[in-house]
Amino acid sequence: MLYKTLKPFPQNFLWGGSTSAYQFEGAWDEDGKSPSIVDMYCHPEDVADFKVASDHYHHYKEDVRLFAELGLKAYRFSIAWTRIIPDGIGDVNQQGLDFYHNLIDELKRYDIEPIVTLYHFDLPYKLDKQGGWSERSTIDAFVRYTEVLFQNFGKKVKYWLTINEQNTMILHPGAIGVPENGKLPDKKTLYQQNHHMFIAQAKAMQLCHTLCPNAKIGPALNITSMYAETCRPEDAIAAHNWETIRCWSFLDTAILGRYNALFLSYLQDRGLCPTILAEDLVVLKNAQPDFIAMNYYSTATIAASKGNASDISARAGDQQIMLGEQGVYRAAENPFVDKTAYGWVIDPIGLRLTLRKVYERYNLPILITENGIGAPDKLNADNTVNDDYRINFISQHITQMQLAITDGVELIGYCPWSVIDVVSTHQGYGKRYGFIYVNRGEFDLKDMKRIKKKSYFWYQKLIKANGQLD
Ligand code: BG6
């Protein structure tokens, strides 16, 4: 749709930036923190692990100062469960609480709204050893952990996100590491874990509303739109199959409090249905999210399954590269879009489409909690980083956001991934996303100096102009 006039970004729009604890903090075993699964799992040997990351734990004041100078209105970060309750269920670690109190106070000093993710991939390793999300007891452990957070930070934090990208953890479990025995859980186990996460999330949302009546909470999923490769009806069905399994099934359960019918049929037919207790259905129904947090990177193009093993792509999949599934869908190419150096489709218009679909389906405010371009940024001899590709990527997405707002979507904020360089989930430190360069190599930690990239100055201007740059 073309418009004569575009609606402006709302005055209180949350221009922000994102990180997650394990990819940013480092200090993996300091001040009482215990290891999480990402500390202990196996990762590709040629890339950095998460033990030091960007050493934010020791640089948080400097980092927040840089965020403030950038003009951020909001900062989305996650809390590490392993800092707060090191063994997952037992004693609370005061030093962990202190770190996040200090961080939040520092943000507030500069009027930056903290947006807190309760859980971003980093399950306590001790809980994993006891069965992790396969066990119902992990639901109770999670709820207790969130209770500690709501009690301690509830007066300071207005925006909470439940579980980051549950769909990535279930559909692409290898993206966040592989257990020591080299074996990822089978699909049946993964869908049981998925169900337990749904219940844990629903309980956390309810608890948040009880303990922090002024706060808002919502799920944070990796959402995208699927295009059919051709106008063949079979391709349209395949695209709808995969869009439902990958996106709507997760959002429907989180927002509408019930399993999606197509998803349930898919699970039942393949013997993948989890054990669902009668009381679970009540818990799901009673959770009332206030908004939807959405991570958007790419769209995907889908063709009908050929019904044999050729449906599964030969290239390695990850959270944005579709793999294919026999009898469900096949990944296809889109000749109308570019790709990043890491093979992720670049599709700003797809963001507008996805925002429209999500809003139309759920009618809740939307907060974009991730969007960005990973690139092997180069630090020049004069200490500059000319990341014009990042400026292009983000500005094109912001243009589409404004169109979506004009379409009628209630978009409340934008937190690109990542405000500063962090370690990628499975592609190390060379794959950078930030507006701020951190001077470390893959293995050589150098001096960790923070250096403003070209995109930093551009984003600063954009925020000042409330998104309206010529
Ligand atoms: C999202 C995750 O899937 O994508 C982040 O929530 C992640 O944790 C981001 O870092 C970018 O992915 P990657 O694999 O390039 O680090």
Image (cartoon, rainbow, N blue to C red):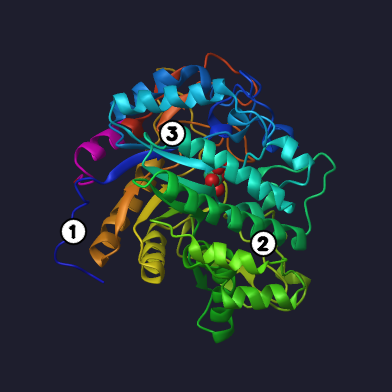
Q: CA distance from mark 2 to mark 1?
A: 38 Å
Q: Which image quadrant is residue 245 in?
A: bottom right
Instruction: Where is residue 367? Give x, y as percent.
Output: 37, 51
Give the labeled residue for mark 1.
7
> Would you call the spot at circle 2 few (<14 residues within 10 Å), some (14-19), or many (20 or more)?
many
Nearer to the camera, 420 or 277:
277
Q: Residue at x 36, y 42 (%)?
A: 158
Task: Say left or right for 108 vs 192.
Answer: left
Q: Which residues are magenta?
A: 457-469
Q: Which image quadrant is residue 87 in?
A: top right
Q: CA distance from mark 3 to mark 2?
A: 40 Å
The tag earlier along the polypeptide, 2 or 1, is 1
Secondary structure, mark 3, is: helix
The tag earlier along the polypeptide, 3 or 2, is 3
In the figure, 275 relative to 13: above or below?
Answer: below
Nearer to the camera, 242 or 285:
285
Tell me how many marks there are: 3
The tag on residue 323 is 2
- Amino acid type for the residue under numbered disc 2: Leu
Secondary structure, mark 2, is: loop
